[in-house]
Amino acid sequence: MWWSYYAFWMLVSAAVAVGTAHPILLGVIVVFVVARPWLPDPVLYLRMAGRVRSLQTQIDLNPANATARAQLAEIWLAKRRPRRAIPLLDQALERDPKSAELRYLLGLAKLRAGKANDALEPLAAALAQDPKLRYGSGYLAIGQALEQVGRNDEASEAYERFVKINTSSLEGLYRLERIREKTGDKTGAASARKEALDTYRVLPRYQRRRQLGWWLRVKLGL
């Protein structure tokens, strides 16, 4: 559950603040929320341990099982271990070469492993097959890859395509704001920021909880 992650870091922050008699340290809660995509989730590690063993057993028993490889790769991605996901996805694609889903996951794994150039081909291939795969997440990923290799105008276009498909994503609007700033489009950046803040206000409560970190980035200009 989303709350288990936040609860862990909030409790740690509160304990540090109380234990050192410096309540100002409670401010690190905000830092943890904002930095959530880059911090390990200790609850996830514990919850997924059994599933990892089960999937690995299935792969060992049936080397042709592309589904188990894909599922295990997604777990490694969730646990921020993209380099462990890449060979699994390569092997799965050998068995199911027409899968847009597998190409997207491979591109995402390469992007998160710091291989932005290598991520472009599988992401582009996935989008050519299914532009709306996972609510347009392929455009979000390829936008990040393009941005990292300095192709900012193309990255901006990719983010625009993403937010047209996934209209409730604050991450997409945040990234669109930042890339427009990079390209000197101040008016467009301000428009994306306003849209992000307006969108957050009308989201259901559970969506606001999930996207709190992105709202803080937009609000604070981080």
Image: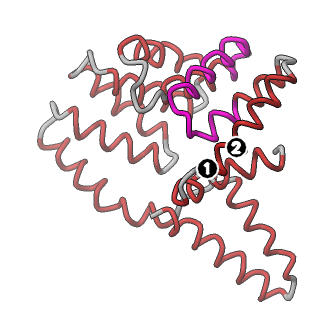
102 or 215: which is nearer to us? 215
Query: In the figure, residue 19 lies in which quadrant?
Result: bottom right
- For the view shown, which residue lies furthest in the left direction? 61
Task: Return the residue at label 1.
Answer: 202
Residue 156 shown in magenta: yes
**Residue 25 to residue 204: above or below:** below
Contact between labelled residues 1 and 2, with CB atoms less than 8 Å apart: yes
Q: Which residues are magenta?
A: 147-175
Magenta run includes residue 86: no
Instruction: Using the image as rendered, state which of residue 137 and residue 59 is in the foreground.
Output: 137
Q: Amino acid at mark 2?
A: Asp
* Mark 1 Cα-neighbour bin, 10 Å: few <14, some 14–19, many ≥20: few
In the picture, the disc for residue 138 is none
Q: What colouring does the structure picture have? A: secondary structure
Residue 198's tag is 2
- For the point 19% across and 50% down, the residue is 57
Viewer-side residue, 194 vs 88: 194
19 lies above or below 177: below
> Is label 2 in a helix, a strand or a loop?
helix
Left or right: residue 32 versus residue 74 is: right
